[in-house]
Amino acid sequence: MDSPYDVIIAGCGPTGAMLAAELRLHEVRVLVLEKETEPVSFVRIVGLHIRSLELMAMRGLLDRLLERGRRRPAGGFFAAIDKLAPAGLDSAHAYLLGIPQPVIVQQLEEHAIELGAEVRHGSAVAGFEQDDDGVTVELSGGEEVRARYLVGCDGARSTVRKLSGVGFPGEPSRNETLMGELEVAAPREEIAAKVTEVRETNKIFSLVPFGEGIYRVVVPVAGVSAEPPTLEDFKRQLRATAGTDFGVHSPRWLSRFGDTTRLAERYRVGRVLLAGDAAHIHPPTGGHGLNLGLQDAFNLGWKLAAQIRGWAPETLLDTYETERHPVAADVLDNTRAQMELLSTEPGPQAVRRLLTELMDLDQVNRYLIEKITAISIRYDFGDGPDLLGRRLRDLDVQQGRLYDLLHRGRGLLLDRTERLTVDGWSDRVDYVADPIAVLDVPCVLLRPDGHVAWIGDDQQDLDNHLTRWFGKP
C-alpha cells in the first residue's frame, strides 16, 4: 500500500501537535489523528516551566504564547512550599507562564498545520500491524492508512501503548482530587480567611477567584470513584474539608483526577513509539506533565526526522528512550515525594516543616527549582566538561539571540575561534562564528533540541561528533 505519510501521530494534544511541527521542519509527511471533534469545553490553566519556554523560544513560538498567557514567579512549586525562586537562574526565561490548556493546544496545532501537517479530528487508532517497512494503521472509521512510523501521543489510556504490548507498571490511584469552576455565594473575605486556615495543613485545597463570583475549586477526596463528579460531591467534600460548602452552585465544569503514577517499560517497539502521557503519568503536583510531554516531542522529533530522511546514525533513534526514560523516572520519583509532603499526616507534615527550613538554603532551593523546571537535565554524552549534555541558555550573539538561530530545527556550531567548519553537514547543521560570544569554552555543537553535543576547538574531533549525531557527511 503506497502512503502519502511518513509518520502517523495518534493524539493532537500538546505533545502530538509539537511533534508534528518538529517533523514538518524537516519536510516529513505527517498525519495527526485526534479522536475529539471539538476542543474541550472547560478551561484548565496549565503552566509552562522554564525549559519549555526556552524550547518555545527556539522555534519562534514564545511571543505568541506570551500574548495569551500570564507570567508568574518561578518559585513555590515543589510540594506547594511557598519559597521564592533563587536569584540568577541560568535562563533568559526564568518565570512560569500560566496559560489556558485549550489555548496552547490550539496554538501548537495551528503551528503544525502552518508547517504542513495534516490533522484529522474525529479519527483515532483502532488497530495496527507493523512490518519491516512500515505500519498499517486501522482507523476508528474502518479506513486503513500506512506510514513508516506510528507515534502514540494518545494519553494515559493510550490505545497505541496497549496494542504494542508495552507494560505500564506503577501505582494505581489511592486518592483523588475534585477540580472545577463554580459560582460561589459566600463573601470573598470569608472565603479567603477559610482557605488560609485550611491550607495551614492541607496544601491541595484551594479556591481561586476568576471574577464575577466564579472560583476554581480544588478539594482532595479520600478514595477513588469511576463516576463523574456532581455538584453534590463538591458540596459534601467542601463541608468535610472546610466546614462549609461556600454556597457553591452553577458549575461551569467539574472533573476529578487521581494520583496514578506509571511509566512505560519501553518507549519504542520497532516502528511504534510513545511520547507524553502515553509513556508516563503522574499527579499534577509540581506542574510537570505537559512540560514533560513537550520535551519528549523536542527530543524525538529531529531524531525520527533524521531516520526518515536517511542521514540518522544507526543508534540515533534509540537515544530517544535512553535519554527520556530516565528523565520521566526522575519526574515520577519527585512527584511521589511531593505527594507525600502534601499529606496531612503528622509524619509527612514534620518532614515538610524540615524541608521548608532547608529551602532557606540557596543551594537546596536552587536544586529543587532546577529539577522542577527541567533546566538541570544532563544527558550522558560521555566524559567531558559539565556543560556537555546540558542545554545551553539563550545567549546574545552577533547575529542577535542564539535561540532565534534555531527556528529551523537544525544543529548549530557556535565557533568562537572562527577556524572550524561544518562542510559536509551544512544541510543539517548551521554555522555561526562569533569570537565575543559569552561562553567559557571555545566552541559548542548544539543539537536541534539545544543540548550541547560537543565542546572543543579541534576540527577532527568535531567531525567525529558531527558524524555521531548528524550522520555521515
Image (cartoon, rainbow, N blue to C red):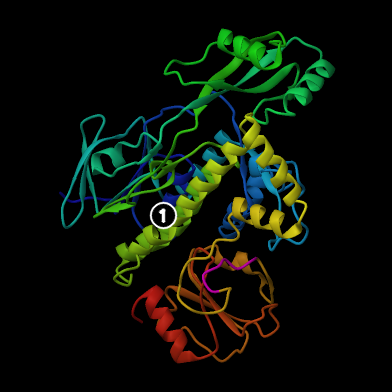
Quadrant in which residue 235 is drawn = top right
Residue span colored magenta: 388-393
* Between 396 and 95, the one nearer to me in the picture: 95
Residue at (64%, 47%) from the top-left corner? 64
- Asked whether, in this view, residue 114 is left or right of residue 11, the answer is right
Compared to residue 467, the image places residue 269 above or below, namely above
User: What quarter of the picture does the C terminus occupy?
Assistant: bottom left
* Between 45 and 310, the one nearer to me in the picture: 45
Determine if the magenta segment contains residue 256.
no
**Residue 34: horizontal and vertical position, in percent?**
38, 35
Asked whether residue 68 appears in the rendered view, the answer is no
Residue at (46%, 85%) from the top-left corner? 462
- Asked whether, in this view, residue 370 is left or right of residue 15, the answer is right
**Residue 354: horizontal and vertical position, in percent?**
71, 45
Quadrant in which residue 27 is drawn = bottom left
**Residue 230: horizontal and vertical position, in percent?**
53, 11
Q: Residues within 10 Å of mark 1 (few under 14, many from 20)?
A: many
Residue type pointed to by label 1: His
Determine if the magenta segment contains residue 389.
yes
**Residue 334: horizontal and vertical position, in percent?**
55, 47
Residue identified by numbered label 1: 325
Residue at (58%, 10%) from the top-left corner? 231
Residue at (61%, 85%) from the top-left corner? 442
* Between 330 and 314, the one nearer to me in the picture: 330
Asked whether residue 366 appears in the rendered view, the answer is yes
- Asked whether, in this view, residue 254 is left or right of residue 329, the answer is right
